[in-house]
Image (cartoon, grey):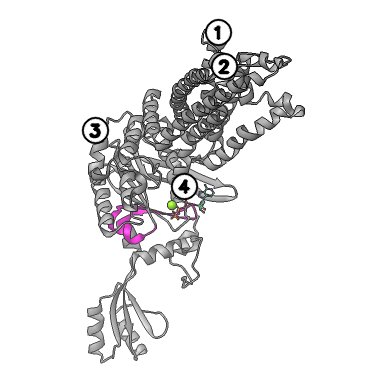
Amino acid sequence: MRSSVACMIELEGLTKRYGGKLAVDNLTFTVRPGVVTGFLGPNGAGKSTTMRMMLGLDRPTAGDVRIDGRHYDRLTDPLKYIGALLDAKAVHGGRSAHNHLLCLAQSNGIPARRVHEVLDAVGLTAVARKKAKGFSYGMGQRLGIAAALLGDPQILMFDEPVNGLDPEGIHWIRHLMKSLAAQGRTVFVSSHLMSEMALTADHLVVIGQGRLLADTSMAGFIAQNSRSYVRIRTPQRERLLDVLHEAGITAVESGSGVLEIDGGKPERIGELAAQHHIVLHELSPQQASLEEAFMQLTAESVEYHAHTDTPARPWGADWQKGD
Amino acid sequence: MAATQVIRSEWTKIRSVASTVWTLSLAVVVTLALSMLISALSANEFDKLNAQDRSDFDPTFISFAGMTLGQLAMIVFGVLVVSNEYSSGMIRTSLAAVPQRGTFLFSKVAVATGLALVVGMATSFAAFFLGQAMLGEHRAQLGDTGVLRAVVGGGLYMTLIAMFSMGVAAMLRSPMLGLGILMPFFFLISNILGNVDATRKVGRFLPDQAGSRIMQVVTPVGDDTPYGPWGGLGIMALWVIAALGGGYALLKRRDA
Ligand SMILES: Nc1ncnc2c1ncn2[C@@H]1O[C@H](COP(=O)(O)OP(=O)(O)OP(=O)(O)O)[C@@H](O)[C@H]1O
Ligand SMILES: [Mg+2]
């Protein structure tokens, strides 16, 4: 095994075309071990398609994806390398949870006792002999996760694992993904919720309309995108601007008499206003949410707009175009 | 990927769904019940037959009469074994576990074929003995010329019908489509083609008509079928190879 590629998923120019539709467009990035990598994109961005190609289920139109340096179908007993939850419904409903996992284990030479271990790990032991069609959505999701864990793989992949789960289930999955990464495993998880990713992911890959929009650390993304500023409303706008200017603070007008000061300290501004007897109607620290940053990042590539208040000039539009 | 692992896995799959049990039991029950009924009716009718019909009287073949209906259950078995993977979405889980698609398909087919062979052979022998019991004085003996070949052939026929259905199901994926095409084909269209003069020469090369030749012990007078019992089974086997080959080629090429 070449250590340089151990436990990594490497995509190179990965492209998938369905008829006339380009679902995945020339994606190149690497998923590394030891961290949770969030795979983010709006509906129809191509996340699931990318994941199916990683597992050798869909054939790439162009490009390549390698697991541990090899093509998926070159892995002997692939469940021991990579475990995936793609679709919780990918189970024969007439089969019991135990038998579902048993047939998967047998196909990869995994000992049958692992079936009991993973059923226990996901909390399905009590319903192990029940048919999967009677399972609730959350139980189905847990069964899919049990299947992913079956071969004790170093790489794990989850496609929107928290969809349809209750808060307790969401909490459980978050904790699971973090602890898997803490054990040094490679964890790749898709979502269309930035807020969800902010809580779990250490690294972020963002796509829109099949194209790579960002490949960055979570901390970097937050630093770059969560602009904090002070919002001010005052009837003495000109006067305040002069005072701020003298103090070396730049304020930007953002329409209807509102001023915004990037990275400004509200205390300092309040004191300055008091010294010069300027009336303030509002002085509030603001933080642009990550969700907003994400929406703006992908705004141009969102396929199915709801036609509401889309930003006129999306933030980051300049560097999206830099291709 | 060791094929033995995949075969064990497919065995677990096939024994853990209800459709296996009900389709195969239906094949046995329907074949035996109908074979006994028709054998009993034929024994009663024998005295009313003319000389020609009496010389064509084939007690062995008559005791397999129930297979015309019983084979439909075998078709359902063959179709469901394969298309269950698609209708449930299990196919993606299965192919992620076994990315060698040839190993996956042929292990599945091997396991299902083994099961169909055991059930088909048992059904054929049971149909023969029960049918002969109904036929009374007109019965054939297992030791008579060609009879053992016909009875073993009946079991092979049931097996090949199931295999053909698996191949077609692998091509069509959807169980509704698979059953919707195969059931009327074997129950109606093949019979019509075989009984209309204009199409008889083509019809007898269809898998079921060619294959069922092996269950005949008495060749009717004036029969001009261009193949013998094993030749007919060979033609059926070619159909099976074509169906499975087509299923494999599509599975290998398609996105799952
Ligand atoms: N089998 C297919 N045939 C044709 N088009 C497809 C197929 N699979 C996906 N697509 C198209 O490719 C695009 C990407 O779909 P994909 O399911 O990968 O998106 P996604 O990012 O997973 O979206 P979501 O967040 O809604 O799950 C979509 O426009 C979809 O319609
Ligand atoms: Mg998706």
Look at the numbered disc 4 and give the secondary structure of its residue: helix
Mark 3 or mark 2, whichever is nearer to me: 2
Looking at the image, which is closer to me, A258 or B143?
B143
Q: Earlier in the sequence, mark 3 or mark 4?
A: 4
| The N terminus of chain A lies in quadrant | top left
Pointer 3 residue: A113
Pointer 2 residue: B60
Mark 3 or mark 4, whichever is nearer to me: 3
Start-end of magenta stretch: A192-218
| A211 inside magenta stretch | yes
Look at the numbered disc 3 and give the secondary structure of its residue: helix
Asked if labels 4 and 3 touch by Cβ distance under 8 angstroms, the answer is: no
Q: Residue at x 30, y 72 (%)?
A: A263
Look at the numbered disc 2 and give the secondary structure of its residue: helix
Q: CA distance from mark 1 to mark 2?
A: 10 Å
Q: Is residue B231 above or below residue B202?
A: above
Q: CA distance from mark 4 to mark 1?
A: 63 Å
**Which residue type does callout 3 highlight?**
Arg
Asked if labels 2 and 1 touch by Cβ distance under 8 angstroms, the answer is: yes
Q: Could you tell me if residue A181 is visible in this image?
A: yes
